[in-house]
Amino acid sequence: MDPDGDLWAVGDLGSRIEQFSSAGQSLSVWTSAGDAEGKFLRPRGVALDGSGNTYVVDSGNYRIQKFDVNGVSAASWGSQGTGPGQFANPLDIAVEGATVYVLDDGLIETFDTDGGNYRTTGVDPQPGYEHIAVGSGYLYVTDRINRKVLRFDLTDLHDIPTVLEWGVSGTGDGEFLAPVGIAVDTSNDGCMSVMPATGASRNTAWTAIISASGMCPRSTSPASRWTITVMCYSPMKS
C-alpha cells in the first residue's frame, strides 16, 4: 500500500508487478523476466518510500532493485550468498524513512535507500517468518509456522528488540492458519481490504483485523486507531 492508497501486488511466477487503485482498478503493470537491470525473476515483495521510489525483492536474482517515480532503475544491490549484503532467500521488504528492511531467509537486515549501511538486527531468525511491514515506529512480522504476528520496536531493533506477539492457531477472531501477508494502515480507523491470491481454488481466504496491541480495533484509544491486516489461508472443507 503506497501513500496514495494504491495497492501494489507481485506475481512471482509471472515476474509481474501490478499497481491497483483503492477501488481495484489496474493502474500499471511491470512484467519483464530476466537478470538484466530492470528485469525480475520471481519478485517476492514490493514497497514504496515517501518520495515515491519503488523497491522490489528480485528473489530469483538475489537482489533488491530500486526504481524512481518514473519507473527508471535507480539502484540495485545484493548477490547470492550469506555474507554481508548478500541474500540466501529474500522474501519481503519494507521502507520507513531512510531505512530499508529486508527479510531474507528468516533474517531481518537493514540498509539505507541506496543499499549501503548494511546492518543485521537483533531479531532471532525463524524459518516461519514470511512477510514484514513497518509503521509508527514498529516492525511487524508474520510467522506462518507458529501462526502468529510479532511486533518489534524500531528503537532497539539492532540491539535486543522489545517484542510483543499475538495469535494462536484457529479460525476465530485473532487466530491464524498460516498468515502469509501483512500491512499497516495508519491513515484512519477503517480496515484495509486485502484480496486473496489468484488461483487459490483449493483454499478459502479471509482477513483478520488486529489492532496495534493485538486487540480488537474497537478497544483501542482514539490516539492509536490503526490496524494490522493479515491474510490467512485454510484448506477448503470437502
Image: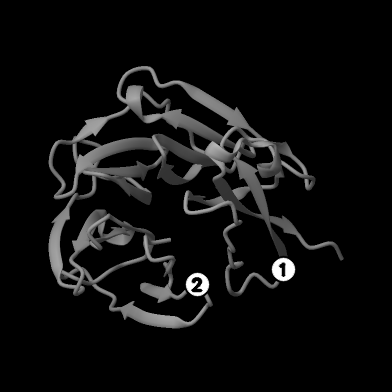
Query: Which dot marks residue 22?
Result: 2
Instruction: For the residues labelled 2 and 1, say whether their Cβ atoms are less than 8 Å apart.
Output: no
Mark 2 vs mark 1: give the one in front.
2
61, 10: nearer the viewer: 10
- Identify which amino acid the numbered label 2 is placed on: Ser
What label does residue 202 carry, if any? Answer: 1
Could you say which is closer to the camera, residue 113 or residue 51? 51
Q: How many marks?
A: 2
Q: Residue 107, position in %: x, y? A: 37, 35
Please state if 223 lies on the left or on the right of 168 as rendered: left
On the image, the x and y values in percent for residue 13 come to 43, 71
Q: Residue furthest front?
A: 222
Residue occupying image coordinates x 44% and y 45%: 132
Assess disc 1: are there few (<14), some (14-19) or many (≥20) residues with their C-alpha within 10 Å of its C-alpha. Answer: few
Residue 75 x %, y %: 13, 58
Tell me which residue sits at (77%, 43%) in the image: 170
> Can see residue 9?
no
**For residue 57, which quarter of the picture?**
bottom left
